[in-house]
């Protein structure tokens, strides 16, 4: 028997999130696949927070620093980068996550996820 998988669209993913389907798990959407994210260890949290604070101090109000929040990409992906430096669009982010045109820079801190970040996620982040 062949294995059948279901590909999620961003619209269906958003409906599932709004319905509370993933409240118990942190997931991201990568090319239509739901990927459960591993728990964040102390070193990862520390470096993410420190880098976010440093970049925030450098850029001030010229950019918004989003720590571990989704971005929306056109390839049925809504990954959660460790840091996303985006346009400071204020309340616009109440109705959507940053789109590619809103993003200046993405940062992933990798130790246990290095191979995935350098292959699959790099390809998803690339235009």
Image: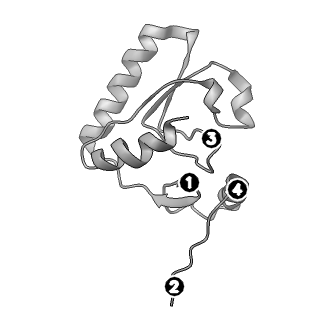
Query: Between disc 4 and disc 1, whose residue precedes?
Result: 4
Residue sitting at x 35%, y 49%: 116
Please tell me the numbered disc located at residue 2: 2
Is disc 3 in contact with disc 2, using a CB cutoff of under 8 Å?
no
Pointer 3: residues within 10 angstroms few (<14), some, or many (20+)?
A: some
Query: Between disc 3 and disc 4, whose residue precedes?
Result: 4
Q: Eyeballing the image, is 90 above or below 60?
A: below
> Dividing the image into 4 quarters, which one contains the C terminus?
top right
Residue sitting at x 29%, y 39%: 44
Please tell me the numbered disc located at residue 31: 1
Q: Tell me the mark number nearer the camera, choosing from 2 and 4.
A: 2
Q: Is residue 112 left or right of residue 59?
A: left
Query: Residue tagged by mark 3?
Result: 72
Disc 2 from disc 4: Cα separation: 32 Å
Disc 1 from disc 3: Cα separation: 11 Å
Residue sitting at x 51%, y 63%: 24
Q: Eyeballing the image, is 88 above or below 38?
A: above
Query: Residue tagged by mark 4?
Result: 18
- Which residue of the protein is positioned furthest toward the bottom in this rendering? 1
Q: Tell me the mark number nearer the camera, choosing from 3 and 2.
A: 2
Q: Provide the secondary structure element on which disc 2 rests.
A: loop
Q: Tell me the mark number nearer the camera, choosing from 4 and 1.
A: 1
Q: Quadrant of residue 23?
A: bottom right
Q: Tell me the mark number nearer the camera, choosing from 2 and 1.
A: 2
Pointer 2: residues within 10 angstroms few (<14), some, or many (20+)?
A: few
Query: Between disc 2 and disc 4, whose residue precedes?
Result: 2
Q: Provide the secondary structure element on which disc 1 rests.
A: loop
């Amino acid at each position: 028997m062949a294995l059948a998988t279901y590909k999620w669209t961003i619209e269906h993913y958003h409906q599932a999130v709004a319905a509370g389907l993933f409240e118990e798990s942190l997931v991201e959407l990568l090319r239509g696949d739901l990927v459960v994210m591993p728990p964040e260890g102390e070193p990862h949290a520390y470096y993410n927070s420190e880098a976010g604070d440093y970049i925030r101090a450098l850029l001030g109000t010229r950019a918004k620093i989003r720590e571990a929040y989704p971005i929306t990409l056109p390839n049925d992906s809504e990954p959660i980068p460790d840091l996303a430096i985006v346009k400071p669009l204020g309340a616009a982010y109440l109705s959507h996550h940053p789109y590619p045109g809103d993003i200046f820079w993405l940062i992933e801190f990798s130790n246990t996820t290095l191979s995935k970040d350098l292959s699959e996620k790099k390809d998803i982040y690339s235009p």
